Image: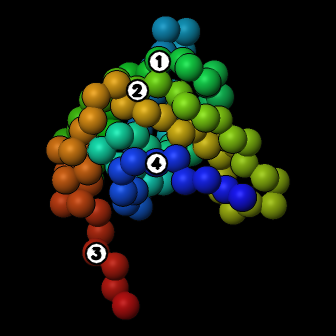
Amino acid sequence: MDVERRRNERKRGFFAVQLDSQSRVNRIGVTRDLSVGGMLIASPSRFAVGEELTLRVYFPDESSETVLAKVARVEETPLKSNEPWRYRLAVVFTDEHPALVDLTSVHSPKMVH
């Protein structure tokens, strides 16, 4: 049985992210979902669980927000997936960032039904 470990509500959001660690800089990714406590990022770069990252999240209006995070989980994307990048990184923010979730709500495209 899969146990839900998240304490915060997740919101879908697709934003470009720059990922920097002590050993690698200027890596790229795209958010898949986020909450005040962390986010899920698709990336061609693999990072280690526990690795500390500086993330810069970019918005369509060319503004950005920088947050510190730690890698909590790394998943390899299944070959049959539509996901173009090989890894999905679950990261936990060093501090909660409710303003980041608010910003993503403002910058997310509205769904048309």
Residue identifier under label 3? 110
Q: Are marks 2 and 4 in contact (CB under 8 Å)?
A: no
Q: Across the whole image, how many numbered discs are drawn on residues?
A: 4
How far apart marks 1 and 4 lie (CA) works out to 20 Å
Q: Determine the CA span between mark 2 and mark 1.
A: 6 Å
Mark 2 / mark 1, whichever is N-terminal: 1
Seen from the viewer's position, the closer of residues 14 and 37 is 37
The residue lying toward the viewer, choosing from 8 and 21, is 8
Q: Residue at x 40, y 48 (%)?
A: 7
Q: State the SS at label 3.
A: loop
The 10 Å Cα crowd at callout 3, few under 14, some 14 to 19, many 20 or more, is few
Q: Which mark is residue 69?
A: 2
Q: Is residue 37 visible?
A: yes
What amino acid does circle 3 point to? Lys
Residue type (three-letter) at the residue carrying disc 2: Ala
Task: Say if 44 sits above or below 52 in the image.
Answer: below
Q: Quadrant location of residue 106? A: bottom left
- Residue at image coords 29%, 63%: 108
Circles 3, 1 touching at the beta carbon (< 8 Å): no
Residue that extends furthest to the right in the rendered view of this protein: 79
Q: Earlier in the sequence, mark 2 or mark 3?
A: 2
Q: How is the image coloured?
A: rainbow
For the residues bearing labels 2 and 3, Cβ distance under 8 angstroms = no
Real-space Cα separation, disc 3 to disc 1, in angstroms? 33 Å
Give the residue type at disc 4.
Answer: Arg
Marks 4 and 3, Cα distance to the nearest angstrom?
Answer: 25 Å
Q: Nearer the viewer, mark 1 or mark 4?
A: 4
**Mark 1: amino acid:** Glu
Q: Nearer the viewer, mark 3 or mark 1?
A: 1
Numbered circle sitting on residue 52: 1
